[in-house]
Image (cartoon, rainbow, N blue to C red):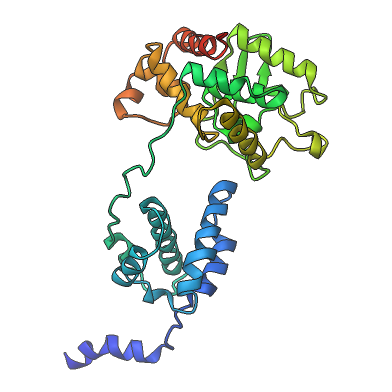
Amino acid sequence: MAEKAAEPLRRMLGKPAKTVPKVSVLVEQFKLERMSTRASTSHSVKAWLRNHVVPKWGDNPITDLQARPVDLWLKFLPLSPKSKVHIRGVIRELWEYAMYRSDIEVQRNPMELMRIKGATKRQRKPRSLTVEEFQSFLAQLDGAFRTMALVCISFGLRISECLALKWSDVDWLNAKLSVERGIVRQVVGDVKTEYSGRAMSIDPAMLAVLKVWRQETQFAGDGDWVFASPLKLGRLPWSYPWVWKVFTKAAKNAGIGSLGTHTMRHSYRSWLDAVGTPMAVQQKLMRHASITTTMNIYGDVVTDEMAQAHSKVVQLALTKQ
């Protein structure tokens, strides 16, 4: 019985002790093997690692990143609760990766023991524009940026999806717009979710806006970007920072305060409400994976309802003051 009880200890002593990797070493390997291929996600993760995790914990073994010390550290960081959740998530991924590599024994991830207060509470209420505010804003834009604002608010596109549109995505005969890709920091990638890549109806008035812009732009080939940048000789669309700068200036000149590019998407959702669009139809038009399970169970919405709701929003966007 004594021999049997001593056997596990004997096996342990016969094995060389594992060296637990430092966080900085683990991070470099993590970037090579497990980093997300989505440009926006990988950029964010690298920023959290570079600016916060590695400077603080880089010389420590991963096993030092226990729940309490990490929690205390995060509490004193001058960041929003949501940002702290992202950092905790990155550290959680590092723990999972270390277990995957057998650098440490498989165990419960200590980051699961942490709770960050206020993580689900918005720090700033999303802004939606009224029809009058949007018209004032639109009056300060021209060319590509005017069309861009109309496309974003008429279809509820994310700016990454809008900038990644090509003329081949417009089905002129059947009046459909396909969202096939996104572009973040001038890197083309997939759309955010599988539900984001859907063909949407185009109202005749919006189709006319796109036709006018295609006649004006010097990059009108099927393979060209709808919002190609002349500064890049059409090889790339306008960059997000440039669009944000133009939109910010236009909003200031219109006297409607500050806004972000995502304001168009928030406004789209508000306008869908304003024209009485059923919630199930809104889910499909917003191209969300799910609002609730019930919304998905009720199945696909009739295309006519989606087209009617889209047309009502376009009418609001193109209303003359």
Is 17 above or below relative to 305? below
Tell me residue 261's x, y (percent). Answer: 55, 34
Q: In which quarter of the image is residue 72?
A: bottom left
The C terminus lies in which quarter of the figure?
top right
At 35% from the left and 19% from the top, the residue drawn is: 279
> Is residue 111 toward the left or the right of residue 198 in the image?
left
The N terminus lies in which quarter of the figure?
bottom left
Q: Nearer the viewer, residue 260 or 26?
A: 260
> Is residue 251 toward the left or the right of residue 1 in the image?
right
Tell me residue 291's x, y (percent). Answer: 35, 29
At 61% from the left and 8% from the top, the residue drawn is: 205
Is 74 above or below relative to 228? below
Can residue 32 be seen in the rendering of this structure? Answer: yes
At 80% from the left and 26% from the top, the residue drawn is: 219
The residue furthest left is: 1
Q: Nearer the viewer, residue 301 or 250?
A: 250
At 57% from the left and 30% from the top, the residue drawn is: 251
